[in-house]
Structures are given as C-alpha cells and as structure tokens.
Amino acid sequence: MVAKDLRALPAVDKLLGTTEAAEMIAEFGRPLALEAIRQALAEARARLKRRDSTAPASEILLNRACELLNAWLKPTLVPVINATGVILHTNLGRAPLSPAALHALQGAAQAYSTLEFNLEDGKRGARAGHAEDLLKRLTGAEAALVVNNNAAALLLALSALARRRKVLIGRTQLIEIGGGFRIPEVLKQSGARLVEVGTTNRVHLEDYAAALAEDNIHLILRAHSSNFRIVGFHSEPELAELAELAHAHALHLVDDLGSGALLPTERYGLAHEPMVQESLAAGADLVCFSGDKLLGGPQAGILVGRAELIARLRVHPVARAVRADKLALAALTATLEHYIRDEAERQIPIWRMISTAPRLLRQRARAWAQALGAGQVVQSQSAVGGGSLPGETLPTWVLALEGPAPDKLLAALRRARPPIIARVEDGRLLLDPRTVLPEQEGALLLGVGNALAGR
C-alpha cells in the first residue's frame, strides 16, 4: 500500500510544468522554487512511509512549496511601531534616525561616494576624517575617530594604549555593558592587565594613588555607570581629581561614558547625565561613547580627545577590524549637524520625544481613544532606556485598553503589519504616544482597531 501511494506522487517535472510553479519561479527564481518543490515531495514521502497519510494532490504539494518559499524569505529585521514608551529601546534598535540622517544614508548607499577619496587632489582620502571636524567643534576635542560601536572604541583604546600594561579601574565600575559583555573581559581581550582599586560601593582617590606604587601602570580607566545606579553608602572621586592624579604620574585617563550625551538632560526634568564636553573639560585624555544612545544617531563608537592619542589609535591593527562603514558615517555626520545647527530638539527623534510636553501627549492619546472608540487616557511614565539614565522617567499620558486577556491583545498587535509593540501594566495594555512616530499613527490605529475587532 505504501509503495502504491509513493508511486502516486507526481514527478518533480510534472509539478514544475504547472501554472502555479511558473508563478513561483517568476517570484522566487527557479533554483529556490525547485528546492521547495523537492522538499514538499520529500515531506510527503516521509508521511507516507510512516503511514500518516495518503498521497496528496498536486495542488496540496504546490501550496506547501509556496509556504516553504515564503517562510524561507520572510524577513526577520522589520520596522515596528514602538508604543512602549521606552525611548531608547535596545531590543527595538535604539535611536530612530532623523529625516536628514536617512537622506544622507540613502545617498551614500545608492551611489558611489567619497568614502576614501579626496576631491581636491583626486587622490586617496581617509575615511577616518568623516565626522571628525563636527565632533571637534561640538566637544572641543583635538581629534576624533569613529568605529562601529562603543565596545569596539574601548577595545581599540586599550589595545593601542595599554597592551601588556596595567590599567587602574575602580571596583564600582566593573560593569556589564549588555549582551553579556563585561569591562574586565574587554580589558583582557585588549591585552591590558586589570588592577582593581577600592570596594564595591566606595572608591577613594587614595585607593588610586596607593595602586600607583605598582610597576607598569600606564592608564586610568573610568567607566561611567550609564546602565545602572548605585545608591546609599557610595562614593567615587570626581573625574577632574582622577585627571590630576593621572597627569601628575604621566598616565593617560580614559573615560568610557557610554551614553554619549551632548545636551544637558536636566533641562528636561531628568537627572544629569555626564556630557562628553564635560569629560574633556575635566581633563580626560580620551573619551569614548555611543552614537545610537543619547546622541540619537546610528550605531557607532566615537572616540574624542588628544590628537596624539587618536593618531596612535588610527594606525593600530584593531582600528581596521572595527572601522565604521559608509552608511554609519553618513548618518552620523547628518545627526551631528543637527547639534551644530541648534536643532537637535526638533530634528532628532529621541530628543523630540524627550522634550515633548505631557499636554501634547495627552492630546494624541485622546485622539487615539476617539478614533478607536475604546480605551481610557491615563497618566503614566516613559523611560529613557537604552543603557542611559537608569531609573529616570518622564511623565506621559497613555491610552489604556482593558480586557480579560491583555497578553492575547499584546500578541495580536505583534502580528499586525507593521508589528505594534506595547506594554502591559496592572492588567491593562498601554500605548504610549511619546515613542510613536507621527507618520506611524495611521498604521497604529489600523493595527489596534483590527486587533480589538479580532481580525
């Protein structure tokens, strides 16, 4: 019986000759369509051998092949609507780019560019120079270098400046920077040797001074706690004090800021986040920070500081391995120009979100409730997130949707096109307008409306 059913399966060539197969070939290409048809037949043979079914019709096999093709080519990186209220949502890609940054990125992507070409003399140029002048003007640094992320920036700095040498760091700063990556492990990979000073909650300047009695100390590293906060019985030396101590002993001071703030966060009712300009003014020789956190640009690691040190970093072998690509450089340059033009609040999405007044958020939430004919507008809190300003929130107004199964509604919203990511609190699903881009409102209302209707 099994043999008979196996013989009843159509041949590959017969399936390829159908109209349905021709449509698949036109959309997906012949090699992939052929692979899908063969897999559909293989699955059918396996079921027949297990006596789980009878020989399926050609239509069923072709439908299965089409399912396989769609599954194989279904994109995994897709745009979503962030209605969580978390401004720098690491899992959702952190900072969305400004229209100018998107335009610059598209221009660099769709044509050739001057990535490493000098238009003045027609000779080879250096990609390291892109964005440098803007960073120098914004921060007051002597020089700057852009790599692919902040962990790479720190790795490069330590590899170039402290390989086989000792680095002093306070025990309060032995942090994990996300994704399981930890400062001690980065230090180890750079070839630097870690010398811990102080205790878990308190580090004094005298701890650093006492450790300088050891041989081969070359650098002091300060790692800012941008993704956590120590409260209670806690103290650390000021950065200026560390700089004075380091320079008195002819050492370098590297400040790993992480979050990369160029604007004063306290202006918006948030706690003060150390700014890059402040670190340099306090005496740090090198400051490294992220491009896609509070800077509001693309993923990048940025190093600013003394020209002599940046020059050493440029020629180090690791610099080639971690260099930024043309798309990141284009988007970063456009983002930095917003700061130069004093338009960051208006043009950079995350700063527009941070600076939006609660009354305007309340108006948007009310408009959503009216359009949907559902929900209640209530007060809540938005988080900055993304490894910046830990525990800091901003007052907001949200649309709260109540129902017997908020988690099911949450899952339904994730199936929308584009997917809608929200949060559940106290048994209610909350939609925060602070993080929903204005151009996404129509899609948000359509997706939420369909989910509420069970479609």
Image: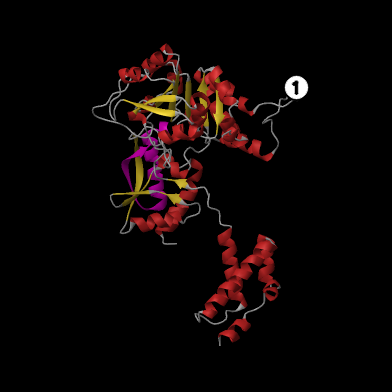
Return the x and y of residue 449 as percentages of the image width and height.
43, 55
Image point 37% across, 38% down: which residue? 383
**Dot 1 crowding, Cα within 10 Å, few <14, some 14–19, many 20+:** few
- Residue 13 position within the rendered picture, expressed as x and y whole percent measured from the top left: 70, 74
Q: In the rendered image, is residue 58 in sight?
A: yes
Camera-side residue: 16 or 338?
Answer: 16
Quadrant that contains the C terminus: bottom left
Query: Is 5 in front, or is 416?
Result: 5
Q: In this view, does 345 lie to the left or right of 73?
A: left
Is 364 contained in the magenta span?
A: yes
- Residue occupying the point 32% across, 41% down: 380
Instruction: Answer above or below: position of 86 versus 12.
Output: above
- Number of marks present in the image shown: 1
Q: Residue at x 53, y 52 (%)?
A: 76
Specify the amino acid type for callout 1: Asp
Which quadrant is the N terminus positioned in?
bottom right
Q: Which colour scheme is used?
A: secondary structure
Q: Is residue 206 magenta?
A: no
Look at mark 1 in the image and give the residue it sits on: 121
